[in-house]
Image (cartoon, rainbow, N blue to C red):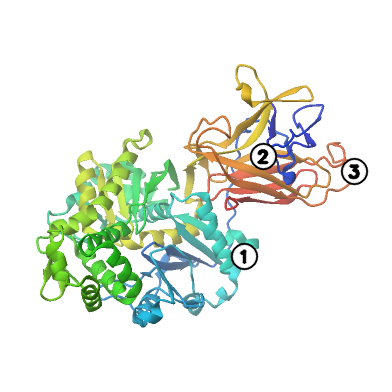
């Protein structure tokens, strides 16, 4: 079967035919692009993918930046001592009783749009602005962004003045699509973190993968098994850990000393040496904005990881609890008032959100007493002026009967009220996990790591254990649960090949023309040109959704520019969730990006294979097994590299 990319068909050559005749373009074709004239030199069926090991550059230090919806931070390690992970120093500012190894993801811009500050500094400065002046400033919070300072690193390693000695790692949710990942990379280029010429200095790490890389190195005393916790305990860190729960398994494995010694000497954590049967596990990354799920299998003998099912999850993060609180205030005081108050009294609104965040962290499933949340005086005064009566009257008249008014100027929330705020988000997380566990690829998994900032919540821990413990799933929480992704990202930067096999989240391919086969192809796809019958809009698949793809595995295609002097080849890429799409016009199939090949001027005369002048084979190799889709290309006649890139932001 012959395949012709369905772009600009003017002057194309059919690469598989001995008689390479040009195929004219149909008049007024809606998908024609002048720069896209190419012809394939390989049939539709891909050759067997080839795998090659990733090239490792000699970096002196790995720096990981975790930009979360709620908070952000960085960590690093030196090549001379890769196991020693250094955390960021305590941020300036901060809230009492809260660890400051991360800072709020808050950005403050001046009225002119210039950068002013980030983190606690931004939040506190904005808070202290005069309300009238604050209206002109631009304040953003709970969003994902990128910013960095190398001051702390430079003090410890002067050689870092040479930028090429640093490998940077940016974390993103695994459920993010390729355009979002490319956006992060483009932002890093614009910020001067790395240059496009040294793109290999920057790695995009998937957050649950990073957590998995870290968890596989943990020892038993660094974990908490939720099923072994005494009822009623509301905080993380009980002395009883996972050790006693697996004592019997450990004793059995000690009879096979060779197996245990082999795993430990391979660098695998003590947990895995003790749990040879638990080499398949789920990581649930519960952050501020999303729940991100991944399923890994520990491979022997080197302790590499294999993804068993594509990343899944959804927008069920801790921010959902904050939004529920805001909606609760709207039910009591009116949505219009809350909107106006946020706009006209921004500092007081920041105070209110800080007060709620502090009480949210103390909420637990077995708490019996009410929680008091301080209302800023500005809120009380503004409501009296806007509403004509006081907040106590508003509470008494509202339909919310589990929030009362304290004479000390506080909202007094019952346990039922706090449970109602948590319930939608927590239920959404559990539903995503349960849906994942129903997949046939995940059957038999008995271990779940609960990680991420929201995993610190006793409310979430209790709900997940109650829902999933009955299914025989052991729920385990690392002691430093909020820093798991950050530390894992550093380890990932040291050894990007640790995740050896991933699952493609989508089906990717291009639109081509194939020989029309009556009875197989729809009549409305028939195109007749120069006596030849073609089927249009055929979806030529590069990789299928759910397909396992090894790191370094390549899908190769060869193309020939249609014109001798052509300097650019542009090929539209399509994607879909279905594995069996036949045409680019099928429901769910969409254009997702473009593959571009920048060509140097062709040398005159026939090439080594005896092809006529101007006929050039450009061989493109695409990799789908990394965290980003990558492409390289060479000019076969000269064996020189061709500048190749995939743009997912062009749409």
Q: What x and y, as percent, mark residue 30? A: 67, 38
Front-lying residue, 240 or 450 = 450
- The x, y position of residue 570, in whole percent, is 69, 46
At which x and y percent is residue 46?
62, 33
Residue positioned 47% across, 42% down in the render: 505
Give residue 523's position: percent from left, percent from top: 62, 21
Q: CA distance from mark 1 to mark 2?
A: 34 Å
Q: Residue furthest top?
A: 519
Disc assigned to residue 605? 3
Left or right position of 233 against 36: left
Residue under pointer 1: 195
Going 70% across and 40% down the picture, which residue do you hit?
A: 32
Of badges 2 and 3, the one in the foreground is 2
**Residue ID for mark 2:** 31
Q: Is residue 602 above or below residue 546?
A: below
**Disc 1: CA contacts within 10 A as few (<14), some (14-19) or many (>=20):** some
């Amino acid at each position: 079967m012959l395949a012709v990319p369905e772009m600009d068909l003017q002057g194309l050559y059919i690469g598989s035919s001995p008689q390479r005749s040009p195929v004219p373009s149909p008049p007024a074709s809606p998908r024609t692009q002048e720069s896209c004239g190419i012809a394939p030199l390989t049939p539709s069926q891909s050759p067997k993918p080839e795998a090659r090991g990733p090239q490792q550059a000699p970096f002196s230090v790995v720096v990981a930046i975790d930009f979360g919806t709620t908070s952000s931070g960085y960590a690093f390690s030196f090549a001379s001592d890769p196991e020693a992970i250094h955390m960021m120093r305590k941020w300036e500012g901060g809230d009492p009783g809260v660890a400051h190894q991360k800072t709020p993801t808050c950005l403050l811009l001046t009225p002119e749009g210039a950068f002013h500050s980030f983190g606690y500094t931004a939040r506190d400065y904005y808070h202290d602005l005069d309300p009238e002046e604050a209206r002109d400033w631009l304040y953003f919070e709970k969003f994902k962004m990128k910013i960095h300072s190398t001051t702390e690193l430079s003090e410890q390693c002067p050689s870092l003045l040479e930028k090429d000695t640093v490998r940077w790692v940016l974390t993103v949710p695994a459920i993010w699509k390729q355009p979002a990942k490319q956006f992060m990379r483009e932002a890093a280029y614009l910020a001067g973190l790395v240059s496009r010429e040294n793109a290999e200095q920057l790695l995009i790490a998937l957050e649950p993968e990073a957590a998995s890389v870290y968890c596989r190195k943990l020892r038993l005393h660094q974990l908490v098994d939720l099923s072994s916790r005494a009822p009623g305990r509301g905080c993380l860190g009980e002395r009883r850990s996972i050790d006693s729960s697996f004592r019997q398994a450990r004793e059995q494995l000690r009879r096979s000393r060779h197996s245990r010694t082999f795993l430990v000497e391979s660098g695998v954590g003590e947990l895995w040496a003790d749990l040879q049967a638990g080499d398949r596990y789920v990581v649930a990354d519960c952050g501020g904005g999303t729940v991100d799920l991944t399923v890994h299998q520990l491979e022997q003998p080197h302790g590499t990881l294999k993804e068993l099912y594509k990343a899944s999850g959804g927008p069920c993060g801790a921010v959902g609890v904050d939004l529920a609180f805001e909606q609760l205030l709207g039910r009591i005081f009116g949505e219009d008032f809350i909107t106006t108050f946020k706009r006209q009294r921004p500092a007081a609104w920041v105070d209110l959100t800080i007060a709620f965040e502090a009480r949210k962290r103390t909420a637990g499933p077995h708490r019996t007493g009410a929680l008091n949340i301080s209302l800023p005086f500005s809120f009380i005064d503004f409501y009296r002026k806007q509403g004509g009566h006081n907040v106590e009257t508003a509470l008494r008249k509202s339909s919310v009967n589990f929030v009362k008014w304290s004479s000390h100027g506080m909202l007094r929330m019952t346990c039922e009220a706090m449970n109602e705020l948590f319930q939608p988000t927590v239920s959404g997380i559990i539903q995503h996990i349960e849906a994942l566990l129903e997949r046939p690829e995940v059957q038999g998994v008995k271990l779940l790591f609960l990680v991420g900032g929201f995993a610190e919540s006793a409310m979430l821990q209790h709900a997940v254990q109650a829902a999933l413990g009955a299914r025989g799933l052991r729920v385990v929480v690392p002691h430093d649960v909020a820093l798991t992704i950050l530390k894992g990202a550093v380890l990932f930067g040291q050894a990007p090949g640790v995740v050896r096999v991933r699952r493609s989240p989508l089906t990717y391919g291009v639109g081509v023309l194939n020989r029309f086969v009556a009875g197989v192809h729809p009549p409305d796809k028939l195109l007749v040109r120069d006596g030849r019958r073609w089927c249009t809009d055929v979806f030529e698949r590069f990789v299928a959704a759910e397909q396992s793809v090894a790191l370094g595995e390549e899908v190769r295609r060869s193309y020939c520019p249609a014109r001798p002097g052509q300097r650019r080849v542009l090929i539209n890429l399509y994607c879909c969730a279905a594995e069996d799409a036949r045409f680019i016009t099928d429901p769910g199939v969409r254009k997702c990006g473009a593959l571009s090949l920048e060509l140097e001027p062709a040398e005159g005369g026939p090439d080594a294979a005896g092809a006529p002048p101007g006929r050039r084979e450009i061989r493109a190799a695409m990799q789908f097994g990394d965290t980003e889709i990558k492409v390289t290309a060479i000019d076969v006649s000269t064996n020189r590299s061709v500048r190749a890139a995939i743009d997912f932001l062009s749409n």
